[in-house]
Amino acid sequence: MKRLLMLLPLAIFLLVAVFLYRGLFLDPTELPSALIGKPLPSFSLPSVEDPQRVVTAEDIKGKPALVNVWATWCVACKVEHPVLNKLAEQGVVIHGVNYKDDNASAQKWLKDFHDPYQLNIRDEQGSLGLDLGVYGAPETFLVDKQGIIRHKYVGVIDERVWREQLAALYQQLVDE
Amino acid sequence: MKQLIHGLLLTLCLLGSASAAIDAYEFKSEAERERYRTLVEELRCPKCQNQNIADSNAPIAMDLRREIYRMLEEGQSNEQIVDYLVARYGDFVLYKPPVNAKTLVLWYGPIVLLVIGFAVLAFILIRRRRASDKPASNTLSEAERERLATLLDRKEP
């Protein structure tokens, strides 16, 4: 008993050490999304290319897809863009939400840097962004074919992030 | 002394300017303004962490303030407004998180630690008292004293 008591401080120390060590590798800016497992919020917004065309949440259903929130004012989005182009070439379905942006510059951007998006939603007021709980671009949602949000990634999707985190999840949604 | 006073005055001035980010919103009543103030002070900005949406100048905080103002004007209750934000940004936006399985340690951990601390303290005190209640160990019984005497008297050959 006494011997066990003597080991108690060591046990507490180890417990705290494990706890703090784990904390070293957690990113506090990464928030868990409140929308995982919920359907995409309903919306009805014009597309970036054509103000006459109305896009709704129904249009996104049918195939699993990435819904990428981007803007021309977002520096990190520029870094991400070539990766999205490459993914689109490989056949990954990507939809864009142009978040609080000037539409003319968004159109120019897509012309200059290539357009990886199948649907491109024009969210000039940021209302869809608000419903999606967006707090900084780029953010990417993984949506299954029923239009349910299954995963959210905040930050730039680069080759490594795709390979190590998102590719398997996307494949899983395709196989479902 | 003079320096100290100057320092204090400067601090006061700085304190005054700390509550920045004021939007020009018109409220119907003083009560509504008060509700708006409490809400934006209790809700946390999702982008700029460790700031409430009242203090933050991030665009997202501005949007949220506008949204809260809009909902107040529509006559929604504080609860509805908070639920609206939690549905989008999760419990993270609350500076006072709800009690659930995930936050149990956060809410009750300190009390549990305090109780454990008192238990250990009580244990130590009781043991100490019990030890002092025992007959003092430096008084020897008759038999012990005799034995000690023989041991001391015994001459080494």
Image (tube, rainbow, N blue to C red):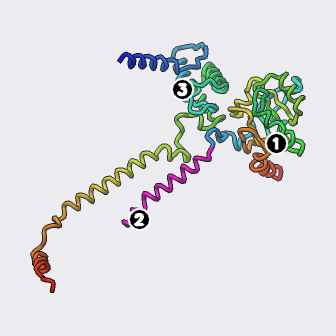
Q: What kind of residue is marked 2?
A: Leu
- The residue sitting at the front extreme is B157
Chain to which the residue tagged by mark 1 belongs: A
From the viewer's perspective, tell me whether residue A42 is left or right of residue B40: right
Q: Could you tell me which residue is drawn at 37 percent across and 16 percent down?
A: B2
SS at circle 1: strand
Q: Position of residue B122 (x, y in %)?
A: 30, 54
Residue behind mark 3: B41
In primary-sequence order, the first of circles 1 and 2 is 2
Chain to which the residue tagged by mark 3 belongs: B
Q: Position of residue B38 (x, y in %)?
A: 52, 24
Q: What range is drawn magenta here?
A: A1-26
Q: What kind of residue is marked 1?
A: Ala
Of B135 and A126, nearer the camera is B135
The lab-note entry on whether marks 3 and 2 share a chain reads no
Residue behind mark 1: A65
